[in-house]
Image (cartoon, helix red, strand yellow):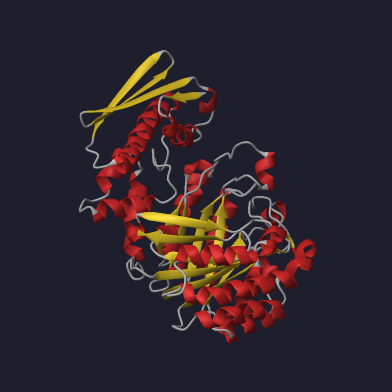
Amino acid sequence: MLTCNEEFLQPELMDVVRLFEGAQELPIAQTMRYESGVFENTVALDGQAHVFRDEAVCADALQYKSLAKRYAKLALYHVLSERTGIRLPWGALTGIRPTRLAYQELEAGRPFEPLFERMCVAPDNIALTRRVIEGQRPVYERREGNCDVFVSLPFCPTKCEYCSFITAPIAATRKYLPEYLAALRQELAAAGALIENLRSVYVGGGTPFALEAEELAEVLAAIAPLRKNGCEYTVEAGRPDTFTREKLEVCREHGVTRICINAQSFSDATLARIGRKHTAQDVRDAFALAAPYGFAINCDLIAGLTGESFEEFCASVDEAIALSPENITVHTLCLKTGARLKEETSRLHEGRLADMIAYSRAALTAAGYEPYYLYRQKYMAGAHENVGWAKPGTACVYNVDVMEEIADNLAVGANAVSKKLFAGGKRIERHGSPKDIPTYLAKAGQLIAERAALFGGQR
């Protein structure tokens, strides 16, 4: 059990505790005080008091809280790392966007590497961060009025065991589709007046290709008036067992420039264990079916899936590279509330996960891919990360904007979260839609009004 004298630090410190197996049962007492430009953290464990002092000048209350969290977490990390003998790949960094912290340092005129070293980040991850920032240069743009649009289609053929999204098999939710598509049309029609400079459109899920071709066409037709500048346009086609030539034709006819084929693994045994109803051959067939249409393709893999060996994962990386998509994202398995796997296991066992990630980095680099976006989540196996890799000139604008939070995000549909940036991104306000479909449908009109108020109404 952890106690701390500052209430606002408690959740931050618990994020550190959760990284170390068994630490939640330890009697830890932490005291933080700030005086004369020095943060002093005292961590009491095993009858010993460990004291850490860090000098820092705080310009205002916001900076005080930010630095207090940083140094309190670092002190606790040092103690737990010493107690357990565990060195974590991202050290005391628990935030989901390491690159954002790096950008803050660079914008202040300082190299980010010294701070990352101080936070005990592993050298290879410092190098990865540097490469990600370099990979973002062609598309990174922080400008007032930039906006991305996200369209949520929370329908799937089946629910995978690791999935925490609010989705259900489309057989159970199809009855809502006519009303859902009507609500999306209303939301998208109202969105045009709220957008100044559209950077990208992303149709995600769920599995958008779970819809029939005619239903998908309805959604894309409603999006068409927003894309006056012909910006990047992605449809997360998703699972290969939903691919048809008709759906690909619909995407091409409506100007889609990029699709996602979410392989997750090329091991048939793994796919069966995680609840997928397709095979590795279906993934290959989906690539072949999409080839004549000229879309850029994003492909996802997950390291750490149930029962998958190091050799199986490496073979999946090799297969993905051989299919030559423009983007390959390597996720680390993450267990969130709502995932069936979360209910069946209390902790992710790392196994050879670090070796898997190291192999993916080496193989993708050798194949000419460069990392261009990076993010982390709570409850990730081995406290690792998710990394998107791209061939030169093919970075996905939407992924960069969303991960770095450098553009507004206008999101429509159930379980969609819009973000509006203020003061150059220093403040972000969010607006979330209900997660379940019936509640969303009942509030669609209210959501349109609330979003208009957040984004400033008619331009």
The quarter of the displayed image where residue 64 is located:
top left
Which quadrant holds the C terminus? Answer: bottom left
In the image, residue 63 lies at what x, y percent?
30, 42
Please give the name of the residue rendered at 55% of the width and 41% of the height, measured from the top-left corner.
Answer: 351
Q: In the figure, 265 relative to 149: above or below?
A: above
Residue 29 at least partly seen: yes
In the image, residue 80 lies at what x, y percent?
42, 27
Residue 389 at least partly seen: no
Please give the name of the residue rendered at 31% of the width and 40% of the height, measured from the top-left corner.
Answer: 61
Q: In the figure, 385 relative to 50: above or below?
A: below
The quarter of the displayed image where residue 116 is located:
top left
Judge left or right: residue 350 versus residue 282: left
Judge left or right: residue 404 versus residue 310: left
| Residue located farthest toward the top when viewing the structure as drawn | 47
Relative depth, front residue between 269 and 162: 162
Relative depth, front residue between 357 and 197: 197
Please give the name of the residue rendered at 34% of the width and 71% of the height, measured from the top-left corner.
Answer: 138
Please give the name of the residue rendered at 51% of the width and 67% of the height, measured from the top-left corner.
Answer: 452
Q: In the figure, 9 relative to 409: above or below?
A: above
